[in-house]
Amino acid sequence: MDKKYYITTPIYYINDVPHIGHAYTTIAADIMARYKRLGGYRVFFLTGTDEHGQKVEKAAALSGIHPREHADSMVGRFTELWETLNISNTGFIRTTEERHRKVVQHVFDKVRENGDIYLGEYEDWYCVPCETYYTEMQLKDGLCPDCRRKPEKLKEESYFFRLSKYTQPLLDHMESHRDFVMPEIRYNEVASFVKGGLRDLSVSRTSFSWGIKVPSDDRHIVYVWFDALTNYLTGIGYLEDEEAFKSFWPCDAHLIGKDILRFHAVYWPSFLMSYGLEPPKHIFAHGWWTIEGQKMSKSLGNVVDPHEVVRTYGVDEFRFFLFREVPFGLDGDFSKQAIVNRINGDLANDLGNLTSRTVTMIGKFLKGKIETPEKKGGADDHVETSAMRLIKEYRKEMEVFGFHKALQNVFEIMSILNKYIDSEAPWKLAKEGDVRVKTVMFNLWNGIRIAAVLLYPFMPGKSQLIWKALGIGKSIETCDLEEEMRFYTPSDIAPIDKIPPIFPRIEETA
Ligand code: MSP
């Protein structure tokens, strides 16, 4: 059976400076992509940028350039960040690409042919200076949420999508696919929204022009969300490489933030049903980060620049912190103290120290060699059986985006190994000439090797360093997960000696 996995991030608005929120979703997708590759899956991991719409049009006009040129000048900020964060995406899509225009127009046309798009009138609150429509809900005290001026009720001709028709089909789909929206709290949120009945959705605009034209009616621009969501088809070769497309669709997981859930879990599957494609298998919505207890906002000046965090703490430390600190799906708080605590505690103390002690002792007591255990006691078996149990738990959690619990299981292995090294005191065994020293070092070596593999999706660089310290020359990235998840005697390892600290402690400044 072909094991394939297709995962996506949202495509990011080109106008924003990439921040911790963008980094979060993208790293999460990267973790899953790397995990699946370890398990032998053929993975397509797609990310990209959302480049149409009124905001982009305006920003470009302010600089006196074409919106496309404006987008060209901004996209590098995202691609550079993905490099810095060691993101292993297979595809990158920009909605201004020609291949995407074709797909959007084709899908729009087909849905219209199917009778699900009709011409009507769109009426809402329009802020003239901002040239933007707002719904009643979006207004703040009846004023424009942006410039605080009074909006007018305006009407505009618009194409509508018969979303109302999909109320029942969507509910049926959700009923038979309980993990369509994850986590459960988001599933319930979507289900209750849909149960309330869906209203038809305006899917075109005439008030600005930076977008994809409605086929055979170029007074209209396709609504940005219809355009943006369709990227998930374009990105894997729809209309260009039908075979590639068919081999990856339906998408296994759209990762998103909780703020864009309705677009993904209500509109998107309805468009797909109307068009005649299967809905994605899972939509996972994560929570939001606050910064030192406050909402992150430009006006507060507390927007976290991932480049800076990486410069200060290191890329793998940042990646690890985001998923160790907060259950994936819930909101969390980013603070300097919290990241320093994680680095000094989990990484420097629990993992780093254990690794360097073990490596030093293998060098000193066993001349850098791992041998098959000669004598085994109860504590030795306990290490192996616990590791096997925790690996199982880890894998179960990874399958359902339980990154936080997956990491807890890895650190339980660390804690068992740390207790083991202290209780079995291999330095004493060596001094007494007891052959059990081989057994203890065998177990420690295997436990750390396995922990490094389990940590690899989160910390690809550091995990490889741990392997290197253990004398393993192979690339961890291409290792076989099944093969590595057991205790074995290595046949060819490099001489093991002292190593520089893999996770240096962060000195705390008051
Ligand atoms: N362009 C749309 C998505 C279209 S997908 C077909 C968009 N872009 S965005 O640039 O605003 O993307 C934002 C992503 O970053 C969302 O998933 C959002 O949840 C996430 N975050 C923005 N701020 C965030 C935090 N403070 N914390 C966590 N994630 C946050 O929406």
Image: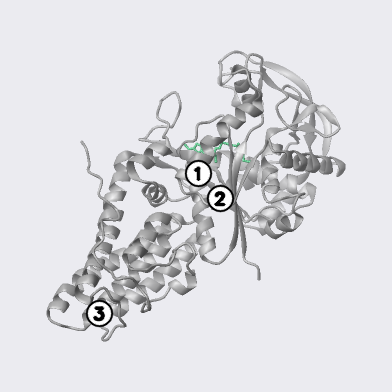
The Cα–Cα distance between marks 3 and 2, rounded to whole angstroms, is: 42 Å
The Cα–Cα distance between marks 1 and 3, rounded to whole angstroms, is: 43 Å
Q: How dense is the environment of label 2, judged by Cα within 10 Å: few (below 14), some, or many (20 and up)?
A: many
| Residue 47 horizontal/vertical position (percent) | 59, 45
Q: Quadrant of ligand 1?
A: top right
- Do the residues bearing badges 3 and 2 touch, measured as CB atoms within 8 Å? no
Q: Quadrant of the N terminus?
A: bottom right
Q: Earlier in the sequence, mark 3 or mark 2?
A: 2
Residue 82: image tag: 1
Q: Which residue is mark 2?
A: 89
Question: In the structure shown, which secondary structural element does the residue marked by tag 3 occupy?
Answer: helix
| Residue 314 horizontal/vertical position (percent) | 36, 46
Q: Which residue is mark 3?
A: 438
| Residue 143 horizontal/vertical position (percent) | 58, 17
Q: Amino acid at mark 1?
A: Trp
Q: Which residue is drawn at the image coordinates 72% and 55% (left, top)?
A: 245
Q: Which residue is drawn at the image coordinates 76% and 20% (left, top)?
A: 155
Q: Is residue 13 left or right of residue 119?
A: left
Q: Is residue 466 left or right of residue 36?
A: left
In terms of depth relative to the viewer, which is nearer, 466 or 161?
466
- Do the residues bearing badges 2 and 1 touch, measured as CB atoms within 8 Å? yes
Q: How dense is the environment of label 3, judged by Cα within 10 Å: few (below 14), some, or many (20 and up)?
A: many
Q: Amino acid at mark 2?
A: Asn
Q: Within 8 Å of ligand 1, the CB of disc 2?
A: no
Question: In the structure shown, which secondary structural element does the residue marked by tag 1 occupy?
Answer: helix
Q: Earlier in the sequence, mark 2 or mark 1?
A: 1
Q: Is residue 45 at least partly visible in the picture?
A: yes
| Residue 416 horizontal/vertical position (percent) | 29, 68
Q: Tell me if residue 204 comes above or below residue 40 in the rendering.
A: above
Q: Is residue 136 at least partly visible in the picture?
A: no
